[in-house]
Image (tube, rainbow, N blue to C red):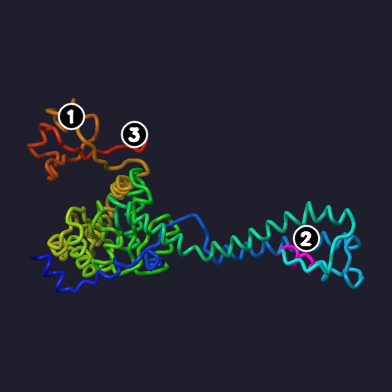
């Protein structure tokens, strides 16, 4: 009932997800290694022009081996004209090779250049016209296959850092991450990093559905304001009731709003930064080691693993690994909790690992 009332209250528009794939080109963008069609046409046009000039030079050097219908000696412009009509397979026949050497040059040089010329121009034209179709096909295929991915809403400093941390664990690849933002310049940077991007307002459910939030395993809310983060979290929780939602906010007084909206974990960025600043005034080395622990691809890192069979029944304090906490039944137990004195099957350990241990 609450979900239905929320939907009626906000009058959510679901028309975007009902659009065919070709209509989503530019909204949902898939990363690929090819350059833009305009740049491709420009580059290949230069190559075609170079082929034309090379052909004209060969003809001009052996211009005495060619015959003009008017009987005049060929100028460079005539040679350029002959090359253009020959490479384009127009062939008016007003200039023809008459000597054996000129005909040999036509077979060995002009003909291969003609083939390359046609491939360049025709291929470029076809590619430019089919780029939209190719992108639409990639979108359609991706929407059918994507699942258990992570959606990052907001590609600012927090969003980019969160993605870097996920990729640093070596368990996540760029293809597992979808970025949602409404800033085209920001999305261009995310796409260049190999990430799938969705252009839209994440407070709208159809935008989140376009990012396949209903099949995502995790959603990271890294928006610029706490109010937006709350609305995004409400919408995301309605669409993805089983996904893990992590949100970042500026003010601690809004933490309960995010938790009530459905966030599993809330990070208060301003307070966290303030604590680190305060610690750094007296013990800067502590800040350095904390930063090291939060950087998974350098030095130490905090990781989570399942308990091994031989560890069951023992104390988490006496393991070879430096254990920080135990996760049992979804609850986080500190190392000084009495329950941690005996590890149980199904427990997960939060421990400090080194990069070399991977």
* Mark 3 crowdedness (10 Å alpha carbons): few <14, some 14-19, many ≥20: few
Circle 3: element type: helix
Circle 1 residues within 10 Å: few <14, some 14–19, many ≥20:
few
Magenta stretch containing residue 51, yes or no?
no
Q: CA distance from mark 2 to mark 1?
A: 80 Å
Label 3, label 1: how far apart the Cα atoms are: 19 Å
Task: Tell me the SS state at disc 2.
Answer: helix
Q: Is residue 82 magenta?
A: yes
In the rendered image, which quarter is residue 138 located in? bottom left
Q: Which mark is residue 137?
A: none
Quadrant for the C terminus in the image:
top left
Q: Position of residue 273 (x, y in %)?
A: 27, 58
- Label ID, residue 55: 2
Q: Nearer the viewer, mark 2 or mark 1?
A: 2
> Mark 2 Cα within 10 Å, few/some/many (few <14, many 20+)?
many
Whether pointer 2 and pointer 3 mark residues with C-beta atoms closer than 8 Å, the reply is no
Task: Report the disc number at residue 357.
Answer: 3
Image quadrant where one finds the N terminus: bottom left
Q: Is residue 310 above or below residue 10?
A: above
In primary-sequence order, the first of circles 3 and 1 is 1
Q: Which residues are magenta?
A: 81-88
Mark 3 touches mark 1? (CB < 8 Å): no
Q: Earlier in the sequence, mark 2 or mark 1?
A: 2
- The residue sitting at 30% across, 58% down in the picture is 152
Q: Which mark is residue 318?
A: 1
């Amino acid at each position: 009932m609450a979900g239905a009332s929320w939907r009626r209250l906000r009058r959510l528009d679901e028309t975007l997800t009902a659009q065919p794939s070709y209509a989503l080109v530019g909204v949902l963008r898939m990363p690929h290694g090819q350059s833009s069609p305009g740049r491709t046409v420009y580059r290949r046009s230069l190559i075609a022009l170079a082929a034309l000039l090379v052909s004209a030079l060969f003809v001009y050097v052996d211009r005495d081996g060619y015959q003009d219908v008017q009987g005049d000696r060929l100028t460079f412009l005539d040679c350029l004209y002959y090359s253009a009509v020959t490479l384009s397979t127009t062939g008016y026949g007003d200039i023809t090779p008459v000597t054996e050497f000129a005909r040999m040059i036509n077979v060995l040089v002009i003909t291969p250049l003609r083939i390359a010329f046609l491939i360049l121009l025709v291929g470029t034209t076809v590619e430019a016209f089919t780029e939209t179709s190719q992108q639409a096909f990639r979108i359609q295929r991706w929407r059918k296959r994507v699942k258990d991915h992570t959606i990052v809403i907001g590609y600012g400093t927090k969003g980019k850092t969160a993605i870097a941390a996920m990729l640093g664990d070596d368990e996540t690849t760029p293809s597992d991450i979808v970025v949602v933002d409404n800033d085209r310049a920001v999305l261009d940077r995310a796409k260049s990093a190999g990430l799938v991007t969705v252009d839209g307002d994440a407070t709208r459910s159809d935008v989140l559905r376009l990012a396949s939030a209903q099949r995502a395993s995790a959603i990271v809310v890294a928006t610029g304001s706490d109010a937006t983060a709350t609305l995004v979290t409400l919408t995301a929780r309605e669409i993805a009731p089983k996904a893990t939602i992590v949100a970042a906010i500026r003010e601690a007084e809004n933490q309960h709003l995010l938790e009530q909206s459905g966030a599993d974990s809330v990070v208060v960025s301003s307070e966290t930064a303030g604590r680190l600043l305060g610690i750094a005034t007296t013990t800067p080395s502590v800040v350095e080691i904390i930063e090291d622990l939060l950087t998974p691809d350098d030095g130490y890192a905090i990781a989570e693993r399942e308990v091994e069979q031989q560890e069951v029944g023992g104390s988490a304090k006496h393991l070879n690994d430096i254990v920080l906490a135990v996760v049992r039944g979804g609850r986080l137990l500190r190392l000084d909790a009495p329950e941690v004195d005996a590890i149980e099957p199904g427990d997960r350990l939060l421990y400090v690992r080194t990069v070399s241990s991977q």
